[in-house]
Amino acid sequence: MADLNPIAKRIHNVSPRPVRLTLEDGTEAVFEMDWVEFFQQEFKAEGSREDEPDAEYRFVSSADNESVLVGRRASREEGDEEGWSMVGRVLEAEAVDE
């Protein structure tokens, strides 16, 4: 069996504590996960961003298990009725120092 994605594994191990994620566009933010799970190698999680609590974020492993992809669903106040939009992929994950 192939290894778990190291970024997904880090997010899983840090949760439910806050995790600082760096995205491919340079965004660095603290996320709190509502739930995280692995099904074999497949990773899924949902959570919110500390500075954007009304938006929902979903994290999934890519089909080849090489990346963790991020989607965002805007709050109703933002007027996004389309649902989820692709944000990008996670480059780094680390525990937030308390």
Image: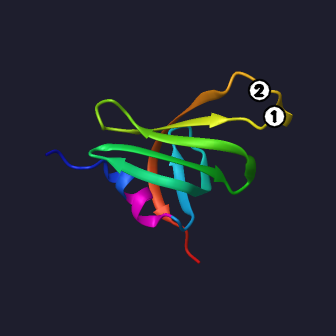
Residue 76 is marked as 1
Please state which of residues 10 and 76 is positioned toward the viewer in this rendering: 76
Seen in the picture, residue 25 relative to 6 is either above or below; the reply is above
Q: Secondary structure at mark 1?
A: helix
- Tell me the residue at 53%/53% (across/down): 21
What crowding class fits label 1: few (fewer than 14 Cα within 10 Å), some (14-19), or many (20 or more)? few
Q: Secondary structure at mark 2?
A: loop
Instruction: Considering the whole magenta stretch, tell me its main secondary structure.
Output: helix
- Quarter containing the C terminus: bottom right
User: Disc 2 designates what residue?
Assistant: 80
- The image shows residue 30, relative to residue 69, as above or below, that is below
- Three-letter amino acid code of the residue under disc 2: Asp
- Give the residue at x 62% y 27%: 85
Image coordinates for residue 11, horizontal then vertical, percent: 44, 57
Q: Residues within 10 Å of mark 2 (few under 14, many from 20)?
A: few
Colour convention: rainbow
Q: Residue 57 at what x, y percent from top left?
A: 60, 43
Q: Residue at x 46, y 53 (%)?
A: 36
User: Horizontally, is 2 left or right of 35 in the view?
Assistant: left
- Is 17 inside the magenta-drawn segment? no
Name the residue nearer the viewer: 28 or 43: 43
In whole angstroms, how far apart are the C-alphas of marks 2 and 1? 6 Å
Amino acid type at circle 1 is Arg
Give the extent of the magenta segment: 10-15
Work out whether 78 lies above or below 53.
above
**Side of 40 relative to 80 (left or right):** left
Q: Do callouts 2 and 1 mark residues in contact (Cβ within 8 Å)?
A: yes
- Which residue is rendered at x = 28% and y = 31% of the image? 64
Q: Seen from this angle, which residue lies furthest right?
A: 77
Q: Residue furthest bottom?
A: 98
